[in-house]
Image (tube, rainbow, N blue to C red):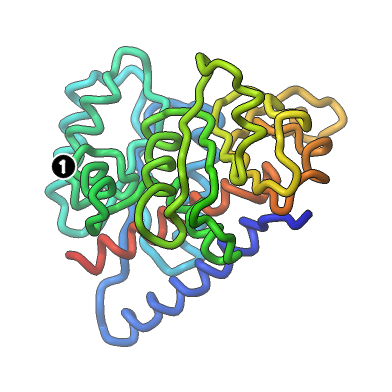
Amino acid sequence: MQLLDGKSCSQQIRQEIAQEVDAIKASGGRVPHLAAVLVGNDGASENYVALKVRDCAEVGFESTLIRLPDSISEQELLDKIAELNADDAIDGFIVQVPLPQHIDEKKVILAIDPSKDVDGFCPENVGNMTLGLPTFVSATPNGIMELLRRYQIETEGKHCVVLGRSNNVGTPMAILMSRNANPGNATVTIAHSRTKNLAELCRSADILIVAIGKTEFITADMVKEGAVVIDVGQTRVPDNSKKAGYRNVGDVDFDNVKDKCSFITYVTGGVGPMTRASLLQNTLKAHHRR
């Protein structure tokens, strides 16, 4: 078993980006600028946005954090998005989710200028990804593809099972793995909570990508010997033995699954750091396009 070390891999990507930013500065150019909109004070969102701001500082990006109260109206948020769309100083921006219940997340996604949609969620970018055209690919799927690429994991002709069908992970992940590219060219099955014979299907996977949002859902008896397992899940569970009072648990029962795998990610150092690195890559791409 070999760990897919997203922490180390993402650090390498950040170093590559920082070198490019240094070259931009040396030529007298403007450095990339990422903005993040945070509505309310959700703990996980606060932590994630803080990490994004730190990542920007590390690679030499400018960053702006826009804090808005959870009482903000949907129209006020859409007006703020329109401001960011029109701001030439900002290359890309994200609106952190989840949003308050009174705000329609789909309306927010549709309001973002596709050229600044570094999350890769808007229909134009999703469509371009599906067609294999230049675009911003959603950060988590893109990070997973980068992890597979840098570890030179063979995907062509393999059976890939993607467990989860969300718009930001499962569905784009399945499209990317099936495309005529490297990584890619896999035979892909999308599974979800209503899939019959789920355990049997998972056992048939050469590559198992799990994004179902259920802690330790994948057990050892559901994994093929020698499989590659990518765990996208991350859920906080109470743990009084930890200083923070909780620990992060994935969708895979790591301790019991790892010995059956050829490669596997670990919840705190696998997909998460790669997602953040991919957002930086998308922001740099947006900067070059502008």
Work out which residue is located at the far bottom of the displayed protein and give it.
27
Amino acid carrying mark 1 in the image:
Glu
Relative height, residue 217 to residue 116 (above, below)? above
Q: Does residue 35 appear anywhere in the picture? A: no
253 vs 2: above or below:
above
Which residue lies most toward the right here? 241
Nearest the camera: 55 or 106? Answer: 106
Residue 203 % position (x, y): 67, 33
Position in image of residue 96 (x %, y %): 39, 35
Quarter of the figure with residue 26? bottom left
Indicate whether 50 appears above or below 29: above
Q: Is residue 153 left or right of residue 135?
A: right
| Foreground of the two, 57 or 214 | 214
Query: How packed is label 1: few (under 14 Cα within 10 Å), some, or many (20 or more)?
Result: few
Task: Please state which of residues 223 and 281 is positioned toward the viewer in this rendering.
Answer: 223
Indicate the position of residue 31 as horizontal and vertical percent values: 31, 70
Residue occupied by mark 1: 83
- Image quadrant in which you'd find residue 121: top left
Give residue 10's position: percent from left, percent from top.
Answer: 56, 61
Q: How many marks?
A: 1
Q: Residue at x 60, y 28 (%)?
A: 201
What residue is at 20 percent from the left and 35 percent from the top?
Answer: 80
Q: Viewer-proximal residue, 92 or 175?
A: 175
